[in-house]
Image: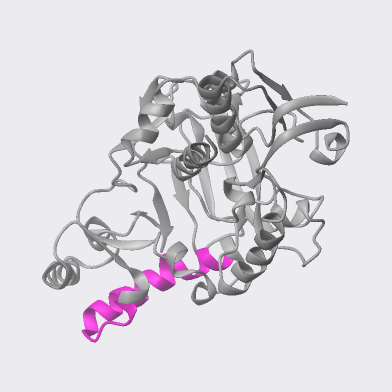
Amino acid sequence: MEKVKNLIVGAGISGAVLAERLASQLQENVLVIDRREHIAGNMFDSKHSSGITVHRYGPHIFHTRSKKVWNYLSAFTSWHYFFLKPMAWVDNRYVTLPFNLNSLYQVFPAYLAQRLEKKLVDSYGYNVKVPVMKLREQQEEDLRFLGQYVYEKIFEQYTLKQWGIAPEKIDPEVMARVPVFVGKDDGYFQDTYQAIPAQGYTRLVENMLHNSLISVRLKTPFEKIKDTVEYQRLFYTGSIDEFFNYQFGELPYRSLRFDIEQKNTEYYQPAVVINYPNNFDFTRICEHKYFLDEKTPSTVISVEFPQAFKRGENEPYYPISNPQNAALYERYMQEAKKLPNTYFFGRLGAYKYYNMAQAVSAALDLFEKIK
């Protein structure tokens, strides 16, 4: 029987942060396993034959307001500063996202755009985000019209494709990610730190795991190893319902399929990400060379198709956040509390819609708790 102090299931960003902290700060040995053939989880990127760094599981742009998180990751990478400025294809034209004061003039006649701009600024101030759902409830006719327009043209069909359910049935916290921005900043995020690791996300995670006290085994599911390794602490970043063999039922997730294609043109589209709310089965197209400003004669795109998660057929990406699913997760957490020295974390383990910075922060907090 093999013995280790710490067993971490999952070599994504959450598992890598915790492994690095346990090894470097506590000098404890760590075994990290992952059922996939690579580290870095959904952040995994690699060089395409064209010379372009491709994000295999969709676009990843690191952004945070936390100096602590930024400084921590900066020990393992240099950065390529990158500010996401996506667009949407609406009524056969490109429109700035999130929908802002510039967008008004892209979709409406000038007289109407000016009137709406004045009413938005008078009602909410400047450089503020207003949830679309709040605009739709406005008593003022023009603002209610704008809310309904943005909801129908940018929000409703995209959400139906992305989540498979109507926007009203999604957790409002998730829905708040698509506001109307009363300002002219075309950047999708307003966070202090926005960048991409200069050598890629895979290299970042590789550097974090580069410690003689850390062992990594790929293509190794937990079921394969759990009876042959004796561990003092278990950290699990996989799906908590899978860990308990679905005894209370399955937690629902959304999954994604990516069709990655090389195009024989220098650039395919005018922005790194174009959303398609109302046309086609896919939700967006990402052009990868924009991320690190790579100069190549051809380009690589990925077309993103949301789909239902089916066990054994695809990957769980997004927990579907609503009260019913939260209650089911809580039943599993009550079971988890009965297990000594066992911790569930990460997007799947915590059943939370984390971005990368939130996942790093949660893993650092977990380390402080067990330290």
> Number of numbered discs present?
0
Viewer-side residue, 271 vs 53 = 53
- Is residue 51 visible to us here? no
Location of residue 218 in the rendering, given as x and y in whole percent from the top left corner? 75, 27
Query: Above or below — where is 139 with respect to 293?
Result: below
Could you tell whether 351 is left or right of 232 in the image? left
- Image quadrant assignment for residue 191: top left
- Seen at 37% across and 32% down, the residue is 70
- Image quadrant assignment for residue 263: top right
Magenta highlight on residue 204:
no
The region drawn magenta spans: 135-161
Query: Above or below — where is 86 with respect to 289?
Result: below
Viewer-side residue, 200 vs 238 = 238
* Quarter of the N terminus within the rendering: top right
Magenta highlight on residue 144:
yes
Could you tell whether 105 is left or right of 43 in the image? left
Describe the colour scheme in one phrase. one colour
Location of residue 255 in the rendering, given as x and y in whole percent from the top left corner? 66, 54
Location of residue 115 in the rendering, given as x and y in whole percent from the top left corner? 14, 72
- Image quadrant assignment for residue 99: bottom left
Location of residue 271 in the rendering, given as x and y in whole percent from the top left corner? 40, 41
- Seen at 35% across and 70% down, the residue is 132
Viewer-side residue, 358 vs 111 = 358
Q: Main secondary structure of the magenta part?
A: helix
Query: Above or below — where is 339 with respect to 84?
Result: below
